[in-house]
Amino acid sequence: MDNQIFGPLELPSGKTISFREGRGRDRANVIQAQKMTIDNMASATLLIDSILAVKCIVEENGVAVNGDYRSMFEDMSSSDLDYYMAVRQELFGMTEERKNKVKEAASFLLSKLTSTDSSKLQSTAMPAATVSG
C-alpha cells in the first residue's frame, strides 16, 4: 500500500510537519484508546479526529517522530492544530466535487435497486395477529 507523505507544511508557530493520510487501523487504534460514553460522544468524536490527525504526522521540523502521538497532541498549540486540521480537511475531506460524485454514485445505485418479496422474509414460526370483533 502506497503511503504518500504530504509536507513540509509550515504551521502558524513556524514549526514544520510532514504527514500522511489516515488509515482505518489508525482510527481503530485511536478509538480503542479513547474513553467514550453516551454523555461525551460528540466531544469524543471531535477529539478522536484531532488525535487521529496528529497520529498521522511522520516528521516534525525534518525529524522523524517517535510515535508518541498523544504527547504531540497534548503539546500542539490550538492555532497549529486548527490550521493543520483545516489543511487535512481540504486534502481529504468532502469537497464540493467529492459531494457531487457521492450524489452521482448514490443516484446510480438507487436506479439499479432491486427489491425482494418481503413475504418470503417473514417468519412463519409466529402467526400474524388477528383482530376479532
Image (cartoon, grey):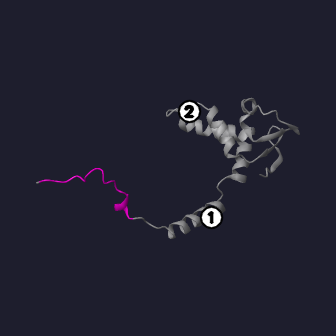
Q: Residue 86 in the image: state x and y as whole percent.
A: 70, 47
Specify whether residue 129 is painted magenta: yes
In the image: residue 89, left or right of residue 57: left
Q: Is residue 65 visible?
A: yes
Number of residue marks: 2
> Residue drawn 49% across and 34% down?
38
Q: Residue 116 in the image: state x and y as whole percent.
A: 42, 64
Report the front residue among 43 and 36.
Answer: 36
Specify whether residue 37 is painted magenta: no
Report the front residue among 84 and 129.
Answer: 129
For the residue labelled by badge 1, is the local secondary structure a helix, a strand or a loop? helix
> Residue drawn 74% across and 33% down?
69
Q: Which residues are magenta?
A: 117-132
What kind of residue is marked 1?
Lys
Q: Earlier in the sequence, mark 2 or mark 1?
A: 2
Identity of the residue furthest to the bottom in this view:
111
- Quadrant in which the C terminus is drawn: bottom left
- Above or below: residue 75 compared with residue 24: above
Q: Which mark is residue 101?
A: 1
What kind of residue is marked 2?
Met
Identity of the residue furthest to the front in this view:
125
The residue wearing badge 2 is 36
